[in-house]
Amino acid sequence: MKEQDIDDRMKDVLEKLSEKELRMTPQRILISKTILAMVKNHSSLKEIYDETQKVLPRVGMSTVYNTIKMLESLKIIDTFDIDGKMRIDQTFPHINIYCRNEDSIIDVDGQAIEEIKQVLSKYGINVDVKKILIDGKCNNY
Ligand SMILES: [Zn+2]
């Protein structure tokens, strides 16, 4: 995410917090910016913690975790688990393809979700699909 985008998202975060009459410490703001910069990469808690250590060497893992959960509760980011490990994610409806052999996650959005909804509706299932995780081995790139 570009620096400008991160600043815009931070403004959003601070506005949402002030609506709830909550404030953030400068430390939490720095952690939030680190999280926002990493959200497109589906980073893990450990990766975010390691990155946070570069700017805030004394910060604890639980503070990083709590900041992730706060951003999730404000609907700024999403989280999901792979093999019991938390990953951060963007909030728009999309498909995450987890490539086990690469340990990487690719986003597929838009039309694919609509097509899956149509297949489900043939089975009489109407679901507001927000996120799909496809978990497997990739060999196409
Ligand atoms: Zn994603």
Image (spheres, helix red, strand yellow):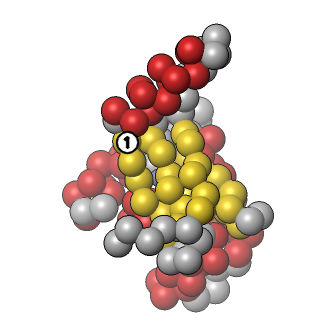
Q: Looking at this view, is 59 or 130 the one in front?
A: 130
Q: Residue at x 64, y 86 (%)?
A: 58
Pick the front one: 97 or 29: 97
Q: Amino acid at mark 1?
A: Asp
At a point 37% along the width and 42% down the height, the residue shown is 109
In the rendered image, the quadrant that contains the C terminus is: bottom left
x and y, in percent, of residue 88 in the image: 55, 58
Residue 104, image x and y in percent?
49, 71
Vertical arrangement, residue 55 with respect to residue 48, above or below: below
At horizontal 42% and vertical 28% (from top left) the residue drawn is 115
The CB of the residue at mark 1 lies under 8 Å from ligand 1: no
Q: Which residue is outermost to the right?
A: 84
Q: Residues within 10 Å of mark 1 (few under 14, many from 20)?
A: some
**Quarter location, residue 82:** bottom right
Q: Is residue 107 visible?
A: yes
Q: Quadrant of the N terminus?
A: bottom left
Q: Secondary structure at mark 1?
A: strand
Point out the residue furthest to the top here. Answer: 124
User: Is 135 on the left or on the right of 112, as rendered?
Assistant: right
Along the viewing direction, whichever of 99 and 119 lies nearer the viewer: 119
Q: Nearer the viewer, residue 139 or 55?
A: 139
Q: Residue under circle 1?
A: 109
- In the picture shown, does residue 2 fall above or below 75? below
Tell me if I can see residue 18 in this picture: no
